Image (cartoon, rainbow, N blue to C red):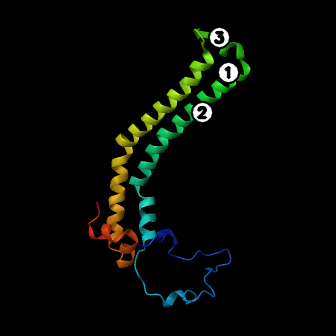
Amino acid sequence: MRLDDPWDDAPVVDRCGRDGTAGVPGLDAPAAAEPDRGPSAADVYLEVHRSAAFREVRRRYRRFVVPAALAFLLWYLAYVVAATTAPELMARPVAGAVNVAMVAGLGQFLTTFLLTWAYARHARLRRDRAALDLRWDTQEMTRGLGQETARGLGQETARGLGR
């Protein structure tokens, strides 16, 4: 099984225009000597990255994660600030030995679980299908790139025998 990185199939060019392959055996040949192989896996992934479907998946992700993370951070900071600036409020008993600080602390745990549930539900309902469609499209596009790419994807996947 090959573990090649599809983003690393072309040498990186530095600021002076050198490609970093000088003196490396087998890699210092001029670019014109290489046959035109067509699009590479990196080209396919860049095309998918630029697609409207990918941007929509990312937009849906950000529209949930950014407000949820900010709300949770504000809730946590409010708890910390209240604990440090208003100890008399936090020490106020609610029921028996349970005080406001304990209720708010347990509320932090509850909020964490609720946020995890909401994230998983949002992903399942709003993003997973679109992301799976993108994955299938990407696999279809890379399937025609040749045996080298097929080996990189795994022999079972390339033959359709994977589970």
Residue at the image point whose x is 34% and y is 67% from the top: 141
Secondary structure under the numbered disc 2 in the rendered image:
helix
Residue holding disc 1: 82
Residue 95 falls in image quadrant: top right
Q: Nearer the viewer, residue 40 or 151?
A: 151
Q: Nearer the viewer, mark 3 or mark 1?
A: 3
Q: Nearer the viewer, residue 89 or 58?
A: 89
Residue holding disc 2: 73
Residue holding disc 3: 92
Picture layout, residue 13 above or below residue 61: below
Residue at the image point whose x is 26% and y is 66% from the top: 161
Q: Nearer the viewer, mark 3 or mark 2?
A: 3
Secondary structure under the numbered disc 1 in the rendered image:
helix
Percent x, y of residue 90: 66, 16
Residue 18 falls in image quadrant: bottom right
How many numbered markers are drawn?
Answer: 3
- Residue 85 lies left or right of residue 18; in this view the side is right
Say what amino acid the circle numbered 2 marks. Leu
Say what amino acid the circle numbered 3 marks. Arg
Percent x, y of residue 14: 65, 75
Residue at the image point whose x is 36% and y is 63% from the top: 138
Say what amino acid the circle numbered 1 marks. Ala
Badge 2 crowding class, 10 Å Cα cut-off, few under 14, some 14 to 19, many 20 or more, is few
Compute the Cα span from label 3 to label 1: 12 Å
Secondary structure under the numbered disc 3 in the rendered image:
loop
Percent x, y of residue 93: 62, 10
Quadrant the C terminus occupies: bottom left
Residue at the image point whose x is 63% and y is 88% from the top: 23
